Image (cartoon, rainbow, N blue to C red):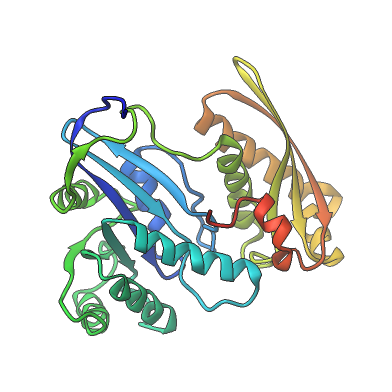
Amino acid sequence: MLEDYGYGNCGYVAIVGRPNAGKSTFVNQALGYKLAAVSRVPHTTRRRWVGIYTDDDAQIIFSDTPGIHESKNRMDEMMDRTIKRAIDKNDVTLLLCDPMREFGMEDEMAAKAAAAGNKPTILVFNKCDKASAEEISEMELNYCARFSEKPKIHHMSALKNDGVTDLLELIKGMLPKGPFLYPDDQIADAFLRDIGEDIIRESALELLHSELPHSLAVMIDKWDEREKKIKIEATVLVERESQKQIVIGSGGKMVQEIQRQSRGKLGKSFEKFVDLRLFVKVMPDWQNRIGLLKEMNLNDK
């Protein structure tokens, strides 16, 4: 028997789009919590995050998926399957795009994936505070040409939280009526360790810029949580010795800065003092090691 969590418009929403379109930024704004890592570096999201938005009359269960792109290794293949399953399992597809970027192969793949899912779709134009009317119009023509029926259209700026509330209202109206599936104070189904790993990786990507984004992963080795403190030991994985030196930096300054920034973000997210220690390890070709990818929870069960 289901517990009585409430009743109203309730359902699942898959968020898809090309890398760096603003999917994770939108989820974090909608939930008012830093669930997913956000970075200017593409492919920041690797897992299928589930975020839960609840108010008095609705519960929206978001699946924030990795950016759609051409598969180059086993990790990419797992991410691709994650996206397709998310669309199949959800009631509504939220297709986010960045109208300031030229329509390309990744946009084509995202539009076709959403259209093939045959689910009610909202085509969301993000970054509309900066995009011109001509850019938005051209992107709309390209995306809508991939659908047999024109999807609903919405404009917003996730970063500035402009249009996010209106989008939530639009989504609510497309969801079926039913009992809520989660308590109203639960905002994610993720383990804190998974969130912690993504926050550390986000800090590393921001500081390293585009030097080695796809070759970097984070694994938490130790998580000791007390009432007011969390002690974390984590390993930054890279594929080559030269990459390890980049992450460590001259005199260890880079890894110390990654550690410092991560500690601040983790403390803010978990509302506790965080004692963080980072280590750097070379593991050749880790992106093709299925056992490791499963251990890192990058496969969609």
Q: Quadrant of residue 132?
A: bottom left
Please count the marks in the image: 0
Percent from the top left, x then y, of residue 108? Answer: 37, 82
Quadrant, the N terminus: top left
Return the residue found at the far top. Answer: 227
Q: Can residue 132 be seen in the rendering of this structure?
A: yes
Compared to residue 215, the image places residue 106 above or below, namely below
Front-most of residues 271 and 174 = 174
Percent from the top left, x then y, of residue 238? Answer: 77, 60
Q: Can residue 42 be seen in the rendering of this structure?
A: no
Percent from the top left, x then y, of residue 134? Answer: 21, 80
Q: Which residue sits at x=70%, y=47%?
A: 219
Q: Is residue 138 left or right of residue 242?
A: left
Q: Quadrant of residue 75?
A: bottom right
Front-most of residues 135 and 213 = 213
Q: Is residue 161 left or right of residue 204?
A: left
Q: Quadrant of residue 91?
A: bottom left
Q: Which residue sits at x=62%, y=77%?
A: 72
Q: Which residue sits at x=19%, y=81%?
A: 148
Return the residue found at the far front. Answer: 1
Percent from the top left, x then y, of residue 252? Answer: 82, 48
Compared to residue 97, the image places residue 278 above or below, namely above
Front-most of residues 267 and 18 = 18
Q: Is residue 279 left or right of residue 41?
A: right
Compared to residue 290, the image places residue 106 above or below, namely below
Q: Which residue sits at x=30%, y=39%?
A: 53
Q: Is residue 208 left or right of residue 109?
A: right
Compared to residue 251, the image places residue 116 above or below, namely below
